[in-house]
Amino acid sequence: MAAMELWQVGVLFVGIAVAGAVATRVGLSVIPLYVVVGMLVGPNVLGRYASEFAVPAGDIVTILAEIGIVLLLFFLGLEFSLDRLLEAKRRITVAGLLDLGVNFPVGVGLGLLFGWSLLESVLLGGIVYISSSAVITKSLIDLGWIANSESEPMLGTLVFEDLFIAVYLAVVAALVGGSGGLETAAVDVGVAVAFLGVLLAGVWFGGPLFERVFDADSSELFVLRVLAVAVFVAGVALAIGVSEAVAAFFVGMGFSSTDHVERIERLLTPVRDIFAAVFFFYIGLGTDPLLVATTVGILAVAVVATTPTKLLSGFYSGRIYGLDDRRSLRVGLGMVTRGEFSLIIATVAATGNGPVMTQVIPAFAVGYVLVMSILGTVLMQYSEVLEGVLARRRSEAAG
Amino acid sequence: MTVYESDLPGVGKKFEVELNDGSQLVIVIHNTGKRELFLRESSDADSEKLFELSDRLARQVGTIMEGAYFQPIRTETIDTVLSDETLIEWVKLTAASPLVGKTLAESEVRQRIGVSVVAVQRGDQTISNPGAEFTVEEGDTLVVIGGQDACREFQEYATAGSSADE
């Protein structure tokens, strides 16, 4: 693959900037648009007609995208509070288990129905289970729902999903990376668990150390130290076969108990946004729309099967939080959006073996995230229409 | 007045304030520092966004609301609670106050009453940490820190001679 030139990096950022502007103008989430732009200027579309102008999916973009994953998960860990989870544990746990119990098996079942192996089906389960924290949280703020009571079950369920995805990624990354055989797989999972154990101990006991090491006066030194720790630890994890995303999540958790959280959020959010955008763009670069087109059958089945399940689990999560029908419906509508984590699971799948993992699942995931993120955002925007329908139904049933 | 506080994971914190007419004021403080204010007509209505403020602006507006810059004269004092026991109190002096025309040393408020004058506001000027030789004038606002009882006593002493409705 050709080395990347600066002007091609320029094309990358111009593409992202344009995609962001268009998404904001039409009121859609930015994530699917970043992916689409990546697809359009990448080797699979532009490359077919004018390869000299296309952005190659070269090593540099791959590295930038990996930093994007690391920062996405680092922030997830940073904002993840075990105390908070424990505080509202009954409701979060019940709503979270309901969400997991309804949506995950549906994905696994679909995979088995398509004739995939168990591991491939488990990957599909993860892709259709995990809602998008980034898109949903942003929509909540944009629509002003954040001030309403429906935001609590939604954010609570997302916290549960975040914790689950950390454990899930650790396990599937080890399983996918394994060379087969049950024994080697067990060893790989063991290594992952041990490494994460070491990190967790660091998180548990390292609080005061983190506090001191990162007590830099200059913003420059501070940003550099945080990035250094996150990227270095994640990189080491990847080198020994553990998911870099999970390692980054744990590093983020390590910081969440320190006084630096607010400063990190203020100074590193723009850095995360840049690299995360490159990650979504990179997903697009590697996606062949023709390949996505070949998955349209399973895509249609998955969309039809997994939209109602999220609506249902979301609706009943709202009821667990004691909300009325209208607000519970909003919880359901809001949880439909899938996004960044489904794509991260797809990148894990792409490191595996066999055509399903390396081609079908990544192509499917892109198509699925495009449909579900647009569908979810639109459902939230037009919730009033559906709320009206629900209200009429109820009054008819009563009358 | 009841204030409900709740966490918004990944976003920040939400405060719901019950207003007298049954509506609720909802304040969302984002981790980024941004404040969003919403009004909810009743507990099951949707929140209507009123406006948003940056961190800096919110603090300034907050100080104005608290009355640090201008206090309607009906209440002569404002106090801010540091802990259960300790207060910071603002007292504006009228011409009749026994403190006017004396230096801080002469009025001996620290020795007799037990409050320390930490700042004096004179017009748009704030004199922080005034020394013992500082002479208090009519119209000065004294910012004092001390125990609850001492602050009460100081307020009574400093405003002695002013009519209650002034």
Image (tube, rainbow, N blue to C red):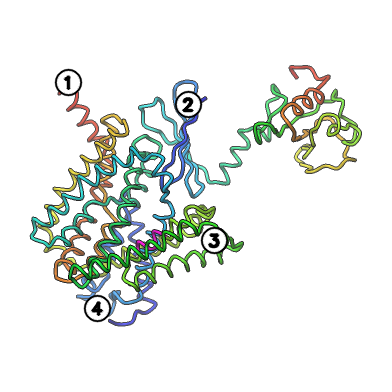
The chain identifier of the residue carrying mark 1 reads: A
Q: CA distance from mark 1 to mark 4?
A: 64 Å
| Residue A257 on image: x %, y % | 49, 52
Q: Earlier in the sequence, mark 3 or mark 4?
A: 4
| Residue A6 on image: x %, y % | 39, 77
- Front tag of 3 and 4: 3
Main secondary structure of the magenta stretch:
helix
- Front tag of 1 and 4: 1
Asked where in the image residue A286 lies, by quadrant, the reply is bottom left
Q: CA distance from mark 2 to mark 4?
A: 63 Å
Amino acid type at image mark 1: Ala
Measured along the vertical axis of the image, is residue A157 above or below residue A263? Answer: above
Amino acid type at image mark 2: Glu
Q: Earlier in the sequence, mark 3 or mark 1?
A: 3
Amino acid type at image mark 3: Leu
- Front tag of 2 and 4: 2
Residue at image mark 4: A51
User: Circle 3 sits in a helix, a strand or a loop, which is it?
Assistant: helix
In front of the other: B148 or A301: B148
Task: Name the side, left or right, on which B40 lies relative to B165.
Answer: left
Residue B125 visible in rendering: yes
Residue at image mark 2: B18
Residues at marks 3 and 1 on the same chain: yes
Mark 2 neighbour class, 10 Å CA radius: few under 14, some 14 to 19, many 20 or more: some
Residue at image mark 1: A398
Q: CA distance from mark 2 to mark 3?
A: 42 Å
User: Circle 1 sits in a helix, a strand or a loop, which is it?
Assistant: helix
Q: Which residues are magenta?
A: A245-250
Residue at image mark 3: A209
The chain identifier of the residue carrying mark 4 reads: A
